[in-house]
Amino acid sequence: MTILIEKPELVSQADSHNLVEKTTELVLDGGFPVPKSLSGDGFLAPEINSFGNSFRDYNAESERQKSVEEFYRQQHINQTYDFVQKMREEYSRLNRMEMSIWECCELLNEVVDDSDPDLDEPQIQHLLQSAEAIRKDYPNEDWLHLTALIHDLGKVLLLPKFGGLPQWAVVGDTFPLGCAFDEANIHHKYFKENPDCNNPNYNTKNGIYSDGCGLDNVTISWGHDDYMYLVAKENGTTLPSAGLFIIRYHSLYPLHKEEAYMQFLNDEDVENLKWLRIFNKYDLYSKSKVPVDVEKVKPYYLSLIEKYFPAKLKW
């Protein structure tokens, strides 16, 4: 099944700030308030996170900051090309359990992401906050609402029934393996202890890849992004390619925020990246201590799940 979607119109951050100087709140069906521009031009990102700091501020002095940095130290040392190949081989079997998308959403009540400097709430609230914010601004793109709801479901890898992987193997910013670690990666200094740094095949700009090879041919650090992509793809989702691209690469911040590794993109990647950059601001800036009324929005999201996924999936 092919779904046609209109190409998004991108607005620069500078233009966005020029358009809107004041905000009001719009309360969605779930009771979750999101910023809304007076001119109706779309989501306006707040300036501070739920801890009172700037979003993605990895240098803010706090106990949270210290634990986040330690997380990235372990991630950068342990995520190697060979490790990712082993994880993809093991988890592509999808032999852990069978359950619906919504059952997986409920499992995320047990998960807190140690890599996130902006929020320490259970993950199901982040999923619904992101989805509801997008739903407000893009009411006709139901595939994008559902993509927001499910983009982090791969974090169930942290739970014992899915192998109980360590946080550094599940969450956090992702990055390519098999080529040099670009300085755009957060806490880049810790990569010097990664064994791949000593492999001459991996420590040049392109490494084992070529310009325009396509991100599908680039090995990205293992985590919830790649796992959920495998689950969706192998279970026959009818989400458009942009939705699968968002799921698989939403944590690849060096690419979509810093424009590192752009040489690997093919034409389809370039088009899908436009949607990922739109999605990203909702993924980041909708995080709030104000909860969504889950039962009130549940019927809408169940209808989307039924539209794009089978009733039960292999995980």
Image (cartoon, rainbow, N blue to C red):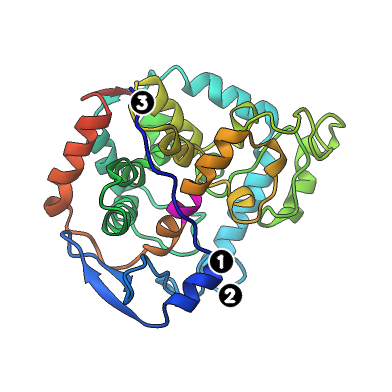
For marks 3 and 2, the one nearer the N-term is 3
Magenta stretch in the rendered image: 276-280
Mark 3, residues whose alpha carbon is within 10 Å: few (<14), some, or many (≥20)? Answer: few
Residue 65, which numbered label? 1
Name the residue: 41% across, 38% down.
Answer: 243
Q: Nearer the viewer, residue 78 or 183?
A: 183
Coordinates of residue 93 in the picture (x, y in percent): 44, 17
Question: Is 86 left, or right, of 170 in this rendering?
Answer: right
Principal secondary structure, stretch drawn in magenta: helix
Which residue corresponds to mark 2? 61
Element class at badge 2: loop
For marks 1 and 3, the one nearer the N-term is 3
Which residue corresponds to mark 3? 2
Element class at badge 3: loop
Q: Quadrant of the C terminus?
A: top left
Coordinates of residue 199 in the picture (x, y in percent): 84, 32
Can residue 62 be seen in the rendering of this structure?
A: yes
Question: Is 119 left, or right, of 298 in this rendering?
Answer: right
Q: Residue furthest right?
A: 200
Q: Are marks 2 and 1 in contact (CB under 8 Å)?
A: yes
Q: CA distance from mark 3 to mark 2?
A: 48 Å
Q: Quadrant of residue 150?
A: top left
Amino acid residing under circle 3: Thr
Above-or-below relation of 82 to 181:
above
Above-or-below relation of 45 to 271:
below
Give yes or no for residue 278 being in the magenta stretch.
yes
Mark 2, residues whose alpha carbon is within 10 Å: few (<14), some, or many (≥20)? Answer: few
Can residue 224 be seen in the rendering of this structure?
A: no
Q: CA distance from mark 1 to mark 3?
A: 43 Å
Name the residue: 63% across, 30% down.
Answer: 214
